[in-house]
Image: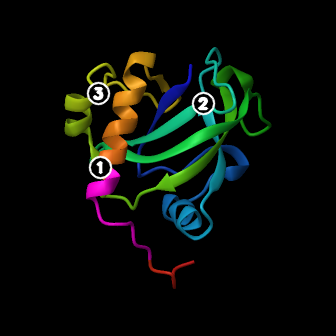
Amino acid sequence: MSAVVMGWNPVTAFGAGPGRTDYRAAALTVYRTGLFGTRWRVSRGQQLDPGTDVWLFAQGQHGRGLLGHGVVAAAPQPGPALPARLGLLAGIVFDLLLPPGEALPAEELELRVPEVNWNAVRSTGTGVPGTAEGALRAAWTAFLHTSPAPEYDPGVA
């Protein structure tokens, strides 16, 4: 698999295990440094090789849409903070995390990338069919080119 969509509900912490944090802090780190690394819980049988594209999909009462992009940096493995029966932890490095509320809307994704069931994205990952990867990247790129650059208050830690 060369691309996966990870679902995330903004009312929960961001990431899993020792890298778990507040989303705003993670987004601010990306804004300031260009990268943010964390661990993410994935299904036990999921193949996520280093270099796999990771797309962050916000879901829940605060709206649904694509909020970020990253790559798998470390293949899934058991972690001390997560019993193996509950899944594995993959190392993810995000290179873009948009401010909450500024996501590429799910409705647009449904039109531009219909091969992905955007109503069934799992927090542990939903694979993107190889035939849909180009359309997903094109939708993301077009959205970023038509949206204002993300702004964060540099005074906020």
Residue displayed at 60% across by 28% down: 42
Q: Earlier in the sequence, mark 3 or mark 2?
A: 2
Q: Earlier in the sequence, mark 1 or mark 2?
A: 2
Q: Which mark is residue 52?
A: 2
Is any atom of residue 103 visible in this view? no
Q: Which image quadrant for residue 101?
A: bottom left
Q: Which residues are magenta?
A: 144-152
Q: Position of residue 33 (x, y in %)?
A: 63, 66
| Main secondary structure of the magenta stretch | loop
Residue displayed at 59% across by 65% down: 29
The residue carrying pointer 1 sits among few (fewer than 14), some (14 to 19) or many (20 or more) residues within 10 Å by Cα, namely: some
Residue displayed at 64% across by 24% down: 48
Q: Earlier in the sequence, mark 1 or mark 3?
A: 3
Q: Which residue is mark 3?
A: 113
Please determine whether, in this image, residue 79 is positioned above or below residue 1.
Answer: below
Residue type, label 1: Phe
Secondary structure under badge 3?
loop
Q: Position of residue 15 (x, y in %)?
A: 59, 46
Secondary structure under badge 1?
helix
